[in-house]
Amino acid sequence: MTKKRNRTRPALSLQERLTRFTEDARAAAENLPAGTERHTLLQKVRDGEAAVEMERLLSQPGLPYPK
């Protein structure tokens, strides 16, 4: 017998979740001294901001599909 998939939807949109993640990571990085851990968090912030921008561009209505 196969298991049923959990088909619940997230409470927040992808845009909101990515924005919240970047804000939380930036706040955590501000509290750390300079070093590897802070650098890693700031890299995650940059990656999250890039993901927010990509998601925004891809979710625009009327976006032409590639041929």
Image (cartoon, helix red, strand yellow):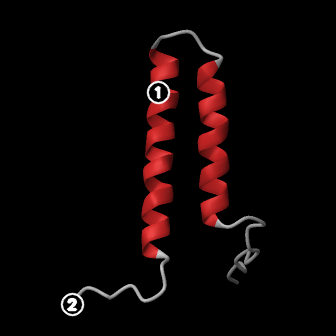
Q: Which element is circle 2 on?
A: loop
The one nearer the camera, 30 or 3, is 30
Disc on the earlier residue, 1 or 2: 1
Residue located at (61% from left, 21% from top): 30
* Residue sitting nearer the eye, 66 or 63: 63
x, y percentage for residue 43? Answer: 44, 33
Disc 1 residue crowd, few under 14, some 14–19, many 20+, Cα 10 Å: few
Amino acid of disc 1: Thr
Q: CA distance from mark 1 to mark 2?
A: 38 Å
Q: Residue at x 45, y 40 (%)?
A: 46
Report the residue marked by disc 1. 40
Residue 66 lies left or right of residue 62; in this view the side is: left
Return the residue at label 2: 67
For the point 47% across and 11% down, the residue is 35
Q: Residue at horizontal 48%, vertical 66%?
A: 55
Q: Count how many numbered circles sit on residues in the image.
A: 2
